[in-house]
Image (spheres, grey):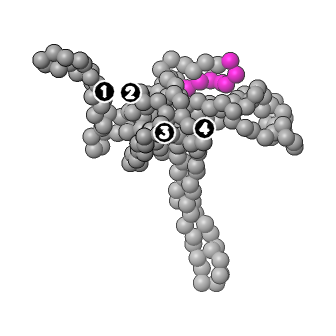
Amino acid sequence: MGAENIFVAGLARIYMAPVGTIAPDGVDGVPMPDGWYDIGLFTPDSLRWSVDVQFDDIEAHQSNKPVRRIQTQDAATLEADLLEWTAESFMAVFGGGRIEKITPAGGGTPYYRFTPPSLGARQEISVCVELQDGNRRMRRIIPRAMQTEGVEQQIDRTSASVLPLRLSVLGSGLGDDYYDLFGVGFGPAFESAIPPEEL
């Protein structure tokens, strides 16, 4: 154990892709596969990952403490405040929708119209969070996620207006709900937990 095992995410990126897009098979020297796009800049203190578990207690008359605890929920969320106003960021933050380029019928300058998704039409998305600290890199892969919160924007005169990305992890039953890939820089810290026959 030592300071070399402390991780400081000096660089972070969020990639997105349609659900079902092939996920990266590795970290170091492995580019993101076709179909993934970088969601762009976000504020340096806003990237958060949260796991929320809930349990129900089974109590017995003969004990002052629960005699059994059953896990009933396992939820996870990803948050970031996006700085770039792009078609991709708007659709990610609002859970889908569509962008149209409109040319006025009587002529004039074209403009763009964003329409948020209608009730029940929010889109699922695949997500990859990439973190780097020196030669150590990791990727958190989320095969299915959905924007499930309302959108509240602070629009100030003297500061950038951010787009609040709030994603909930969805389960699939066909694979892991999310998983982490750690590059070779984590080798010394991780190999001690691997059974000898698998090394």
Task: Name above or below for residue 40 compared with residue 33.
Answer: below
Q: Earlier in the sequence, mark 1 or mark 3?
A: 1
Q: Quadrant of the N terminus?
A: top right
Q: Quadrant of residue 99?
A: top left
Between marks 4 and 1 in the image, the one whose residue lies nearer the viewer: 4
The one nearer the camera, 175 or 115, is: 115
Which numbered marker is on residue 159? 3
Q: Quadrant of residue 100?
A: top left
Disc 2 vs disc 1: Cβ atoms closer than 8 Å? yes
Q: Badge 2: how crowded within 10 Å, few (<14), some, or many (20+)?
A: some
Q: Earlier in the sequence, mark 2 or mark 3?
A: 2
Kindly give the residue lying farthest to the left in the view shown.
Answer: 106
Task: Name above or below for residue 184 compared with residue 1.
Answer: above
Q: Quadrant of the C terminus?
A: top right
- Residue 35 lies, in percent from the top left, at 47, 20
Which residue position is annotated with label 2? Answer: 87
Q: Earlier in the sequence, mark 4 or mark 1?
A: 4
Kindly give the residue lying farthest to the right in the view shown.
Answer: 1
Q: Can residue 173 be seen from the camera position used here?
A: no
Q: Quadrant of residue 87?
A: top left
Disc 2 vs disc 3: Cβ atoms closer than 8 Å? no
Q: How many marks?
A: 4
